[in-house]
Image (cartoon, rainbow, N blue to C red):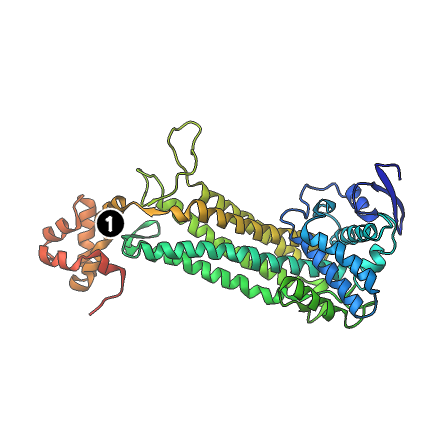
């Protein structure tokens, strides 16, 4: 040890590692051999936390099963808790694009926890005793079952504790807006053309229903994620593992996370296929599609504001142009739609990677995990920002709504039950071609009286089925 570096070793020999860090030989080899991209598993830290949870749960399980002395298990537990708490985040430097099994990140966790445990024991980093990264921290485990277990732990926690609450917060804001604007009648639009009236509350209720359905779809993926590969070791047979280890470790992991984790029904599928992850990604794609629709509707309704539709007012958060003074753009909606596009791309990558399991192992695990977690985090953050800086400030421009509603040709639909489709169509065509109001065209054609027109063409009555 020369101050800046210390010598560690693995099965391939000695490796110089930075003395200031807790990682060891295999982590250092990965840093040197995979200079690919800048994405690491540090962002958002769900993966690091999940590794801390898994290693703590495994240590407790091994102690409970008599495979690890209680004193050694306690040292591992103390170090793993620091990983969970974020104290050692800087010790996880590896990029996503590494070995497809995630072995190097698993060893990164093993080395950091072992070296910190040895430091706590007083022997110091790199001692390899009383805690060894393979023999003790990784006891009864293989990267092939720990990494997929971490995938499920990290994703399940992120979806349930971060993403779903963010979407439900936005949903609550929009539901309140739907109630507040229940009586605001406006032009309906289909095919980007004028249609029969709706209320603004009905429009927003459609957004709310989409979010409800999307959240239900995301929730529906959680049971699949609660099955853990831990206990399958290298190929699914459980070699070198106590047959009770998977169930015992899952129980401890459940206690640490508050989630109902359990051993996967079939370890061979859990290692070689990641259908639960693929399903979760697909659910996020559905959610992204709902948010895309919502955000684009807001952009269109707020367009103008004077020379577009301009029926919604959006918050004026920042200048919209470096050359046009006073311009305000729907930037929150634009950010949300960009996130949706990224989620669509991530889902394509996750789906393809999920199809690439060969024999007893899928070796696309890190990119699948990264894509899915990035989607979840981006959706949570974008939905939260859209809620705070756009949705809460949405208000109708009642004058614009009234002008457009009065000018709509499709109000003529209210006359159809009284005079028939063809006569109603002639009224609309005459009004459009001769720049008349519907009432002027109807009276000119002699199809209705002024009193009948006023009695039958009532916009509020057109927003619900016939009554009486």
Residue farthest top in this picture: 323
Q: Is any part of residue 139 visible from this angle?
A: no
Residue extending furthest toward the right: 13
- Viewport quadrant of the N terminus: top right
Relative image position of residue 336 (x, y in whole percent)? 48, 46
Seen in the image, is 208 located left or right of residue 431? right
Q: Is residue 298 above or below residue 413?
A: above
Percent x, y of residue 16:
86, 41
**Residue at 79%, 50% in the rendered image:** 116
Horizontal side of 307 relative to 416 (left or right) equals right
Image quadrant where one finds the C terminus: bottom left
The residue depicted at 32 percent of the width and 42 percent of the height is 310
Residue nearer the viewer, 278 or 83: 83
Q: SS for tag 1?
A: helix
Asked whether residue 241 is in view, the answer is yes
Relative placement, left or right, of 433 versus 206 is left
Q: Residues within 10 Å of mark 1 (few under 14, many from 20)?
A: many
Where residue 371 appears, x then y in whole percent? 62, 51
Q: Is 338 above or below relative to 424?
A: above
**Which residue in the structure is indicated by mark 1?**
405
Residue at image point 76% right, 60% down: 144
State how many labels appear.
Answer: 1
* Quadrant assignment, res 364: bottom right
| Viewer-closest of 283 and 229 | 229
Of residues 384 and 322, the one nearer the viewer is 384
Identify the residue shown where x is 75% and y is 51%: 105
Identify the image quadrant of residue 202. Answer: bottom left
Name the side, left or right, on which 195 lies relative to 206: left
Residue 252, x across and y down, in percent: 70, 66
């Amino acid at each position: 040890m020369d101050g800046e570096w210390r010598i560690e070793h693995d099965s391939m020999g000695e490796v110089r590692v930075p003395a200031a860090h807790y990682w060891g030989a295999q982590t250092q080899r990965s840093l040197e051999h995979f200079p690919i991209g800048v994405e690491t598993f540090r962002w958002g830290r769900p993966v690091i936390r999940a590794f801390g949870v898994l290693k703590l749960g495994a240590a407790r399980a091994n102690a409970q099963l008599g495979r690890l002395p209680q004193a050694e298990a306690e040292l591992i537990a103390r170090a793993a808790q620091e990983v969970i708490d974020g104290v050692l985040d800087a010790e996880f430097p590896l990029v996503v694009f590494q070995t497809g099994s995630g072995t190097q990140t698993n060893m990164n966790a093993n080395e950091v926890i072992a070296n910190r445990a040895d430091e706590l024991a007083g022997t110091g980093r790199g001692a390899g005793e009383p805690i060894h990264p393979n023999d003790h921290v990784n006891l009864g485990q293989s990267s092939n079952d720990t990494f997929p277990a971490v995938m499920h732990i990290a994703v399940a926690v992120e979806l349930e504790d971060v993403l779903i609450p963010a979407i439900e917060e936005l949903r609550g804001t929009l539901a309140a807006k739907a109630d507040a604007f229940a009586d605001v009648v406006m032009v309906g639009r289909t095919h980007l053309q004028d249609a029969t009236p709706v209320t603004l509350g009905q429009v927003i209720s459609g957004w709310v229903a989409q979010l409800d359905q999307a959240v239900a779809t995301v929730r529906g993926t959680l049971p699949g994620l609660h099955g853990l590969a831990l206990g399958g070791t290298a190929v699914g047979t459980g070699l070198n593992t106590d047959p009770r280890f998977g169930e015992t470790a899952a129980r401890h992991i459940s206690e640490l996370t508050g989630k109902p984790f359990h051993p996967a029904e079939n370890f061979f599928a859990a290692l070689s296929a990641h259908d639960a992850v693929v399903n979760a990604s697909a659910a996020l794609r559905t959610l992204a599609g709902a948010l895309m629709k919502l955000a684009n509707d807001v952009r269109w309704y707020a367009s103008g504001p004077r020379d577009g539709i301009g029926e919604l007012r959006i918050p004026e958060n920042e200048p919209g142009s470096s050359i046009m003074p006073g311009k305000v753009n729907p930037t929150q909606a634009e950010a949300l739609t960009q996130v949706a596009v990224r989620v669509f791309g991530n889902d394509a990558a996750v789906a393809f990677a999920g199809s690439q399991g060969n024999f007893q192992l899928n070796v696309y695990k890190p990119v699948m995990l990264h894509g899915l977690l990035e989607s979840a985090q981006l959706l949570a953050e974008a939905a939260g920002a859209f809620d705070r800086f756009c949705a809460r400030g949405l208000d109708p421009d009642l004058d614009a709504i009234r002008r457009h509603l009065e000018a709509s040709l499709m109000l003529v639909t209210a006359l159809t039950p009284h005079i028939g489709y063809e006569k109603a169509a002639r009224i609309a065509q005459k009004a459009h071609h001769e720049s008349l109001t519907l009432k002027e065209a109807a009276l000119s054609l002699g199809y209705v009286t002024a009193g009948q027109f006023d009695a039958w063409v009532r916009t509020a009555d057109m927003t619900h089925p016939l009554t009486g």
